[in-house]
Image (spheres, grey):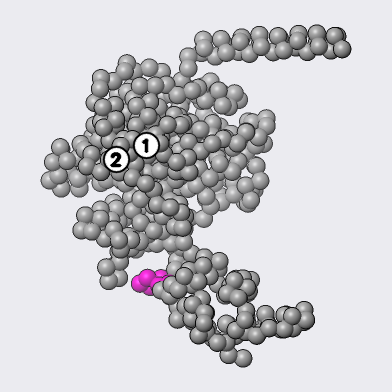
Amino acid sequence: MTASTSQSVFRNAALVSGLLSRQQLDDALAGLVKEAAAAEQPTTADAISDELLGQRLVDSGYLNRWQVEQLKEGRTKFTLGPYRIVNAIGQGGMGHVFKAEHKLLGRIEAIKVLPKSKSTPEAVAAFQREIRAQAQLDHPNLVRVLYADYEGDTYFFVTEYVPGTDLRKLVRRNGPLPYQTAATIVSQAAEGLHYAHRRGLVHRDVKPGNLLVTPDGRTKITDLGLAWFLMEELESGQSAAARSKSLVGTADYLAPETIREPGKILPVSDVYALGCTLYYAVTGKVPFPGGNTPDKIRRHLDETPLNPLHFNPDLPTGFCDAISAMMDKNPDTRTPTAAAVVELLRPWCDESATRHLMESSPAASGIFQRGSLSAPPPPVQLDETASFVLDDAELAPAQTESPSQISQGTFSVHSELEDTLAGGSAIRRAATRTPAPVSVVLAPRRNRWKAILLLAIVLAVSAAAAAWFAGAF
């Protein structure tokens, strides 16, 4: 039988795109018509709904769900250079990311595409800088760039496809990680950063969403779209005044010196962000939850986050001290390099803690709950913000960010685009005022004993009240 396609955008797009042959379409429709007849609900091929047909094509392996949804919208182009686009991975600060198959080699890889709506000369230059910066790196803990090209006015580059998930999703699905798992993941990320730093590249947006964890437990740093190649910038002729007006990164992970002097790009700032990432991994909270962007920036400058023991009492004291050293507000006394982070975390690293991580928990079944935590953590509200590039000329009045703004380098292409982050004048005032004296990031030990004593008193009073209540009745 031959299906009529005159009334269906979906069927026409499927054939024009080349994703589906006429025979495959006819076979799917014939099967649905036959099943309807067997169920004593006779129908025709033209009467089959696009939704029902799409599901049959997915079940048959001809299309995936993402392709079906794109075809329903009438999209017909699923190729880029020598690649066939097979799925959408997400959207980052510099462009859309797709899963693609090389048509000749049959190899699955990831493609990052600069949106045409952002293809200004400045955006293209930044995109090309990103490609060149990443192409110089080859390390097992960094996502590798394999190929770059453009088709018409569409610029793209290809990286290895990394199966697995990111650290943020692991924590959101399973709760705070055991410290051995978190230390191993962050230590591997530090090895990749050390390699990049030695070659003059500072990431500038280190955070849980940019740390990918593979099924065999290897960490790979991704989304270098906000990274700047130091030697190139020094040679670019850009004035210091122009550089000093741009604040790049994610509010939850910004180092104080980055806030005060945005134009000063230091590898040690990545160490601070990595410390914030480790804090999140073992507590399930960003260091300064709640509030808008100016609030978070002010707190990075002036305040001390809650001790990780407040959220995860099973953490070793030395481990908390390591987080404190990485998050020191003073870059001169902070853990100095990514290589030093590797040595600092070595006592708590355990390769077996992350080996077969995803295979052991394919549906995020709670594998991490069986580590140092005695009970599943209560659900927490998202208090993370997304990547941004702040410039004085683009800042709007302060406003509270949506809790749906997540700390992740990529998000669904169907999600709303981020609003322009706000609070320019407040940010500038916070960054230029006299910095507060440097203090230990975590609560001192004597405060821990005060908290323990107070908890003991509360428990004793509660027990006495329960005993009186039982005797009275």
Q: Amino acid at mark 1?
A: Gln
Whether residue 222 appears in this view of the structure is no
Image check: 48 left or right of 132? right
Whether 423 is drawn above or below 7: the answer is: above
Q: Is residue 80 magenta?
A: yes
Give the image quarter of residue 302: top left
Whether 319 is drawn above or below 138: the answer is: above
The tag on residue 102 is: none
Whether 421 is drawn above or below 156: the answer is: above
* Image location of residue 49, percent across then percent down: 60, 76
Residue shown at 39%/62% (left/top)?
Answer: 111
Q: Could you classify mark 2 by the number of other residues whose Cα lies within 10 Å: few (under 14), some (14-19), or many (20 or more)?
A: few
Q: Amino acid at mark 2?
A: Ala
- Whether tag 1 and tag 2 are in contact, CB under 8 A, the answer is yes
Image check: 325 left or right of 458? left
- For marks 1 and 2, give the CA distance: 8 Å
Whether residue 326 appears in this view of the structure is yes
Residue numbers of the magenta segment:
78-83
Q: Secondary structure at mark 2?
A: loop
Q: Quadrant location of the C terminus?
A: top right
Residue picked out by circle 2: 396
Residue shown at 45%/66% (left/top)?
Answer: 100
Q: Is residue 58 magenta?
A: no
The tag on residue 399 is: 1
Whether 452 is drawn above or below 394: the answer is: above
Q: Secondary structure at mark 1?
A: loop
The residue closer to the viewer here, 423 or 180, is 423
Q: Could you classify mark 1 by the number of other residues whose Cα lies within 10 Å: few (under 14), some (14-19), or many (20 or more)?
A: few
Q: Quadrant location of the N terminus?
A: bottom right
